Image: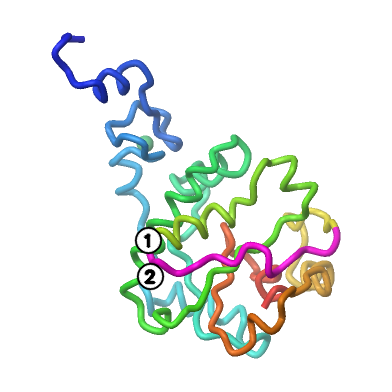
């Protein structure tokens, strides 16, 4: 490496940044995804059939304004590898990065302008201790930084440990989740348009229980 490069170039050379999806060295400083992998993430369009399919999960179940997932989750694709790194390889900055992408997108969406606060879906304290952080809180931090909307981290709590949801169908998940959350500071939430945030939406049972 030539000696006339600025200190930042030296730092990149000494501590290269690797993409959390393809594991190749990235030229995006301090970003978890390389340009190529970022380009492979196809943003869900607001008002699209994908979004309608998500909203249908909640029709007649809870009162809501809108449901939105920033990206469709496909197996063996960039987003799946990225979320795996976020949840199981201690990469909390990925949550803030994905949250910031969603926050920028959010500012252009109808019906979301009057959101008063983001509320991350709570992890049980023992699970949070084990992971070191709640990934939904990290996503909320990115959303907040991009949109200026505050995060209420402590208003919703998980009452007791629930078994992993991975192998349950929707009915079993709902029975398992019902009554497992409590809202603190009820007065603070009255009349507010609040956005519940999680890393992945599948059956929607956990979000529904919180809602
Ligand atoms: Zn990559």
Q: Which label lies toward us, 1 or 2?
A: 1
Q: Secondary structure at mark 1?
A: helix
Tell me residue 34's x, y (percent): 33, 38
Residue toward you, 177 or 202: 177
Compared across the picture, whether 169 is left or right of 148 comes to: right
Quarter of the rendering containing residue 105: bottom left
Residue toward you, 189 or 209: 189
What is the number of the mark on residue 146? Answer: 1
Q: Is residue 133 above or below residue 208?
A: above
Tell me residue 20's x, y (percent): 45, 36
Query: Is label 1 in contact with label 2 (beta carbons under 8 Å)?
Result: yes
Characterize the magenta stretch by its predominant secondary structure. loop
Compared across the picture, whether 175 is left or right of 169 comes to: right
Identify the image quadrant of the N terminus: top left
Q: Is residue 154 located in the magenta-colored stretch of the structure?
A: yes
Segment colored magenta? 146-160
Q: Quick check: which quadrant has ligand 1? A: top left
Q: Who's the residue at 37% across and 61% down the image?
A: 146
What is the number of the mark on residue 115? Answer: none
Q: Is residue 89 located in the magenta-colored stretch of the structure?
A: no
Compared across the picture, whether 12 is left or right of 5 comes to: right
Tell me residue 94's x, y (percent): 48, 44
Residue toward you, 211 or 75: 211
Can you name the residue that lies furthest to the left here?
A: 4
Q: Earlier in the sequence, mark 1 or mark 2?
A: 2
Q: Which residue is mark 2?
A: 106
């Amino acid at each position: 490496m030539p000696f006339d490069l600025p200190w930042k170039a030296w730092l990149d050379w000494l501590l290269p940044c690797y993409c959390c999806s393809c594991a190749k060295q990235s030229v995006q400083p301090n970003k978890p995804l390389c340009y190529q992998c970022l380009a492979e993430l196809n943003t869900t369009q607001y008002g699209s059939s994908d979004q309608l399919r998500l909203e249908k999960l909640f029709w007649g179940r809870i009162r809501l304004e809108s449901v939105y997932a920033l990206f469709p989750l496909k197996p063996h694709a960039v987003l799946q590898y990225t979320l795996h790194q976020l949840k199981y390889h201690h990469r909390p900055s990925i949550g803030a990065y994905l949250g910031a992408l969603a926050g920028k997108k959010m500012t252009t969406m109808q019906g979301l302008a009057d959101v008063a606060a983001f509320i991350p879906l709570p992890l049980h304290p023992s699970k949070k201790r084990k992971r070191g952080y709640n990934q939904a809180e990290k996503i909320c931090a990115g959303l907040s930084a991009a949109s200026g909307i505050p995060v209420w981290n402590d208003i919703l709590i998980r009452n007791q440990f629930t078994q992993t949801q991975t192998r349950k169908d929707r009915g079993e998940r709902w029975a398992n989740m019902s009554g497992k959350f409590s809202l603190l500071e009820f007065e603070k939430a009255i009349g507010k348009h609040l956005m519940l945030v999680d890393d992945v939406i599948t059956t929607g049972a956990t979000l529904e229980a919180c809602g």
